[in-house]
Image: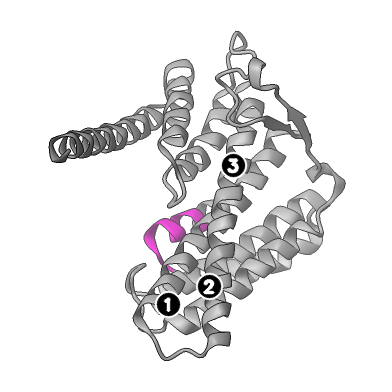
Amino acid sequence: MSVQIASCIQRHTAVPNSITELTKVSLQYESPVEAASTKLGLLITEHAALRASMKEAQDYENASSIVASLWALDLNYLEWTQNLPPEFASTQIPVGAGSQPKEVYGNHYRVYSSIWIAGIWNNYRCARILANELLRGQVSHLLQSNNSYNDEERVSYENILDSAIAAIHTLSNDIFASVPFFLSANTNVPPRALAGNLLMWPLYLASQTSTASDEICRFAADRLAFIAENIGLRQAASMVQTLRRRLDVEELVDSVAEMSMKEAL
């Protein structure tokens, strides 16, 4: 089912009902870990259906309804995390500021019971990032385009916006914290192609969010380059080029702005 869902998400189309119904039937025959992954997939089909109802991400015709649906979906995602089998537990490993290797972003990384579990977690994070990016855009439009809201409505939308931005930031950092587990902190050990494939798309997505900084883009580009060079995944090389072009443009803009400021002074 995951292949069909990914295809529908990319094409902004709804997952066929026949696939969804057959998936629900299969739940009774699955192990707890398989069932957890399937239930996540069913939640993602809701996002696919919602996105398919819109002409484009900037379609604000039914913004208030879309916001309500996305907010409810995000709560369902959070509920999913509260009902997982013990295999989904992870361990946070702190990293001192003076001993931070290039494989680690931030001050910690996470270790999982298997790359499959880590992959499911990152699928969850990607799904919520996509939903919250869409939510952020829709709520921002409502706040900017309508001055008729009462104080309670405006505060409610502002809280949703703050929550969406915070979620995107946290979920992205959680993806970065999974990188050493997939690629191994000891780069002398060649990572498996499977691990690189499972990490590539979540890492790229996390570096392309509305909250991503230049530092994040550089980290993602470095790790994707590692995947391209050490595993041979060509798609990772294309992602690196995209990220580096973005960094080049932003550095050029900053340089021009700095020169303009000096001339003005």
Residue nearer the viewer, 188 or 20: 188
What's the CA distance linking mark 2 and mark 3? 23 Å
Of the two numbered discs 2 and 3 on the same chain, state the one appearing first in sequence. Answer: 2
Judging by the rendered image, the residue that carries numbered circle 2 is 158
Task: Tell me the SS state at disc 2.
Answer: helix
Amino acid on which the number 3 mark rests in the picture: Asn
The quarter holding residue 40 reads bottom right
The quarter holding residue 19 reads bottom right
Task: Tell me the SS state at disc 1.
Answer: helix
Tell me the number on the disc at residue 251.
Answer: none
Residue 203 at least partly seen: yes
Q: Position of residue 232 (x, y in %)?
A: 43, 20
- Residue range in magenta is 5-13
Contact, mark 2 vs mark 1 (Cβ under 8 Å): yes
Tell me the number on the disc at residue 143.
Answer: 1
| Residue at (62, 11) in percent of width and height | 189
Q: Is residue 9 magenta?
A: yes
Q: Position of residue 175 (x, y in %)?
A: 59, 40
Judging by the rendered image, the residue that carries numbered circle 3 is 173
Amino acid on which the number 2 mark rests in the picture: Glu
